[in-house]
Image (tube, helix red, strand yellow):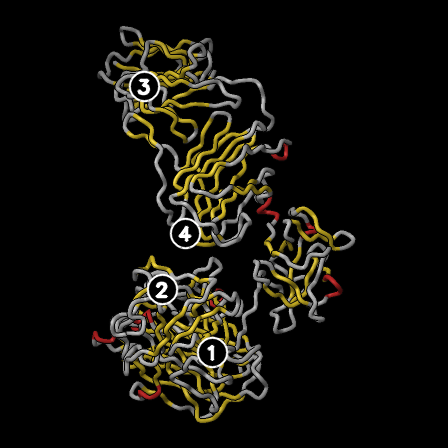
Amino acid sequence: MRRTILTASIASAIMLTGAPTVFSADAVTLTFNRTGNNAQSVTVSTEGIAGVSAELLSVSHSMKTSGSAITSSILCPDANGNTSPTITYVMAVNNLPADYKFNSIGIDIHALNGAGAYQESSDGVDRLWNVDIQTGASETALSAFASASDIDIAAGVNPDGARHKVWDFTASDEMAATSPHIIKLTVTKGSANGGCFFGISSVTLSGSGSTVDPDPDPEPSAGKTYTIKWKNNTSDYMTEAADGGIVISSYATHNKIFWELIPTGKTNCYYVRNTATGRYIGSCNMQPSSNSKVRMSDTPVEYYISKSSSTSGDNKGCWWMSSTDCSGYDSETSGARCLNKDGASTSIITWTTGVSNVGSYWTLTESEDLYETRPFNPAEAVGQADFFYHIIDGSNQSMALTHDMTWQKTAETENQKWYFVGSSNKDGGYIIVDASSNTPANSGAKYRVVENGNLTISFIGADNQRLSIGGVNEFLIRSMRSKLALDLQIYSMPCGSVADFYVTNATVISEGVTLHYPMPVRNGSSVSYPSASRPTDKYTIVSRDMIMVTEAGFTVNVKLNTTPSETVKAYLYFDWNRDGVFEETVELETGREMTSQTIIPPVGDENLGMSRMRLRLTDNGLTEAEDEVHGQVIDFKVKNLGPAVDTRYNPTVGVNDSHRGSAMYDENTKTAIATPRGTAAFLLWKEDMRILSTDATFEVEPMAVKRHLTAVFSPNLDPKTGISQEILATEAQGVAVTLTEDKTVNVITDTRVHHIFVFNTKGDIAAHVAGSSSLCISSIQSGIYIVKAITANGTATSKIAL
């Protein structure tokens, strides 16, 4: 095949990523999702021809994983052009139609620097690369396709680092596809390269019959489906998130990336409806800010959708979208509020239109509605599953296989363990398999998976009837724990995001003892109970404190920062049998201040010990402990002591350092008393990590639970504290060390004394005797010393002052 040589001077071969390119059905685009630094960490998605898949077989170098411009969609080998590397990418495209032919490969190329930021084209540095493309049926049977010499991949890139280019490599003859079809890119340093890293984010195969429509207009009629892609990165699709937010994600048919534009009757005005959920993009009439995240709406919101007025540059041919409740919604030049991809996150936010606001512009591409729900990770074949699931009914019971399929209380048992085999609804659906025996249900029947709109799914058989088990035909799919997770009491952390409502204070009260969230703090001579601010993360664990509970019961009190809406729900979950699964749920009556009824923990040996309580606030309608959350999740440690008892226990007391002070509990006055020593000062009483009081004399009633209180003192700077003429050593029973007035150390014991050492504070030996029970040290200087006596009963130490 004759190759077409593409050089940097052939400007017509370059298409800007920002242009809204739409390929016809005979074009196939590969995009990437990288989770690590090697080829094995990359998932390849395809768009254009149904049934086509792809994989990245190899990359010659470890890839960059961080940097201001490095996203998971960019494959950038960590190889600087000024070191003359030979970079290779090898990928396979599978299931291309037998009659498919192509003569063009478009590569979206990114010019990056060592820090992972975009190169600036205005710095006068040449960044020339050579690109050679080979294709064929296997890696050992490749032939030349096209190449380019000395292309400056940073040419035309703005200093704002927001642009990259698609370079088209066109062969003179069409290539007949094979399956798999191997594509190998070889990239080498050009004639001059002052330093540059070569990244790619998409590869597109197209034939001579492919068409490019630079201006895809949204059709003003129902039934048209579109994907909405961020103009700065054609791998970023506007997506409805599980929590009702709007984000960008990579192309995948199980992501909610397909949209319908419904005309409202006004010029250029539409309702933008997600085909998967039926919900609409909500208003963007908010103060432009990264905090002004746009959310979905159950009711239609009218949007003005218009093409940019730019006749050249970055935004030419792209679209902006403003809800019509915004002032000046139809005026691009006045800076209308509009949908914008947040530069610091994946969220869609409110920003303004304008030539410099490149994040506010989008491409609209007509597409089939290919969405399908996939609430599980399917296996490729029976017996090859890596992920296992519960199939749950509306009463939180799990489908179990006994002699037949029945419903049982959910437990992590083998007969409730299922997995699914298949690739998609379009390819015939999925087989439901009993994992305990690898036996397909219903003789291996395949089922399509559909959403019901109430957070459940149904299985639709070949007869278009819903699978019904015991009269139930709507199900929830929940991941099962591994044996290791159960044995180690490993909990699953929920996904999701924070909301505007959150917990400012919470208490758990049991047997007169109170656990506080946030934890109490010492404030001078008193203890204060602060309020929590808005969390930065959806999940918090109170790991430095715990509460002991008994069958007598306990209560939970929660206070929020604001009065929640009716959609906000609050739940408590408990894992009494300590297997990492929350088996009990208590719903709180939602309000700004909430108090639970008395909660009675179960008795029985399997329920005793340290476990977990989860508080979950959310407004997304999901009810399980590990479901995604839009709100907040807080976990507390709870120790179940079992049956309540009439006995009341006096607390035991201790100190943080016996050289700093002493502590006692007076049973008559029911007070804990702390006494400092030397220059030390009493600071506070603690129980575990919980601050109780800053009073040295602290009243503590006997409790039904055993408690231990610690008196905390500041350092004692008096070196003579603790020094006496006779100290019984704890290391050796029956051994005493004395110091006489004539400065003689005597070791008093009934056994043989092997050695007496005297050390100064630097650790040097100041005096020593072997085989004697006394040692005169009158000749050494005054100061503080440590005596170490080694006897047949063990070793004794003592601090002395001369």
C-alpha gap between disc 2 and disc 3: 78 Å
C-alpha gap between disc 4 and disc 3: 65 Å
Q: What residue did someone put label 1 on?
A: 29
Q: Which of the two marks, 4 or 3, is nearer to us in this view? A: 4
Which residue: 46% across, 76% down?
Answer: 226
Which residue: 40% across, 38% down?
Answer: 505
Which residue: 59% across, 86% down?
Answer: 98
Label 4, secondary structure: give it.
loop
Q: Earlier in the sequence, mark 1 or mark 4?
A: 1
Q: Earlier in the sequence, mark 1 or mark 2?
A: 1
Q: Which of the two marks, 2 or 4, is nearer to us in this view? A: 2
The answer to whether residue 151 is above or below residue 71 is: below
Dots 4, 3 in contact, CB < 8 A: no
Give residue 281's quadrant in the image. Answer: bottom left
Q: What residue did someone put label 3 on?
A: 758
Label 2, secondary structure: give it.
loop
Classed neighbour count for the residue bearing mark 1: other residues with Cα under 10 Å, few (<14), some (14–19), many (≥20): many
The answer to whether residue 603 is above or below residue 699 is: below
Q: Position of residue 540 (x, y in %)?
A: 43, 44
Under mark 3, the amino acid is: Val
Q: Position of residue 44 (x, y in %)?
A: 49, 71
Left or right side of 24 for 562: left
Residue 284, disc? 2
Label 3, secondary structure: give it.
strand
Residue 499, disc? 4
Q: Earlier in the sequence, mark 4 or mark 3?
A: 4
C-alpha gap between disc 1 and disc 2: 31 Å
Dots 1, 3 in contact, CB < 8 A: no
Does the image show residue 125? yes
Under mark 1, the amino acid is: Thr
